[in-house]
Amino acid sequence: MSGSSVTRTVVASAAALAATAVGLWTGIGEGSAHAAGAVPSPDHVVVVVMENHAYSQVIGSSSAPYINSLKSGGASLTQSYAETHPSQPNYYALFSGSTQGVTDDSCVDPGFSSDPNLASEVIDAGRTWASYNESLPSEGSTTCSSGKYAQKHNPWFGFDNVPTSSAKTFAQFPTDYSTLPQMSFVTPNLCSDMHDCSVSSGDTWIKNNLGAYASWAKTHNSLLVITFDEDNRLSGNRIPTVLYGQPVAAGSSSSTTYNHYDLLRTLEDSQGLTSHAGNAADAEDISGIWAS
């Protein structure tokens, strides 16, 4: 663990002890008790990962009015960072707490790793998981690429402990949001995620495809997380990360430095998991943005 990670862990531990001394608060939803500042327990979490844009290209940009409206009504992490370049290693970092030795965007052999990851941990805990992948040819398809679909943005296929059947097409994203899994990821295709197309096109895609869920989440103890795999290689890998939903304090922000491992740990803890994959074990929960 780096010196900064040790410092952050010590500070976080001290804060947790202080919060415990003050007392407990009852989280939104079914009366779940949390230490003050702890991660809430949403009924549903949807994470959407966009592509290759720096914080300043999205946050405050007139090209992303919808994402910025979610920021205003939810929370923004102003010092959120990716791990590396190019895209694929970042997806593995966010999903499993490790880049898994992946260093480029080449297609992987399906099921090449047996390491713990967010999906396997959720499933092992008896909870529900799925991914929804735009332009995936069919449910569970492990194809390398197809039109605007790219396997490199779908790290779940790299693990033999995640059923391929849990990889759905985006057409299977439910309209009755109460039927969503407790934890799910959404992967737009290469145009919708801003990789091949504009910030504006990606912003509109989120509004058109996830806007109704976001509105529903605001009144149904659920959470939408929008983050990016990496920046444009020009901003120190600082990326936009926005959280929205009933558990989030509207208009809040955090200037604490967070990375993909911190987000992974926060997602794990939102599920009440007792294990943490890879570097998430030494990471810090996102704090300072939750409604109390």
Image: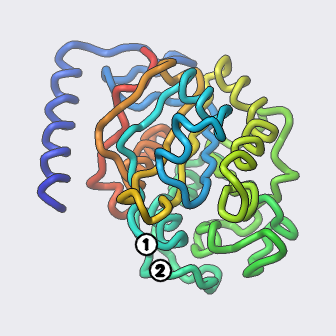
**Could you say where residue 119 lies in the image, as x and y percent from the top left?**
57, 57
Residue flagged by tag 2: what amino acid is it?
Val
**Could you say where residue 25 lies in the image, as x and y percent from the top left?**
37, 14
> In percent of the image, x 84 and y 74: which residue is there?
147
Mark 1 = which residue? 99
> In percent of the image, x 55 and y 51: which residue is there?
122
- Between residue 284 and residue 120, name the one nearer to us: 284
SS state under label 2: loop
- Between residue 201 and residue 220, name the one nearer to us: 201
**Could you say where residue 19 lies in the image, as x and y percent from the top left?**
22, 21
SS state under label 1: loop
The relative height of residue 204 versus residue 287 in the rendered view (above or below) is below
> In the shown orientation, is residue 284 left or right of residue 90?
left
> In the shown orientation, is residue 130 left or right of residue 18?
right
Quadrant where the N terminus sits is bottom left
- Between residue 96 and residue 274, name the one nearer to us: 96
Mark 2 = which residue? 102
> In percent of the image, x 53 and y 64: which residue is there?
91
- Does residue 276 show up? no
Labels 2 and 1 touching (C-beta < 8 A): yes
Decide: few, some or many residues near mark 1? Use Cα within 10 Å; few <14, some 14-19, many ≥20: many
Residue flagged by tag 1: what amino acid is it?
Thr
Looking at this view, name the residue that lies furthest to the front: 62
- Does residue 79 show up? yes
What's the CA distance linking mark 2 and mark 1? 6 Å
Quadrant where the C terminus sits is top left
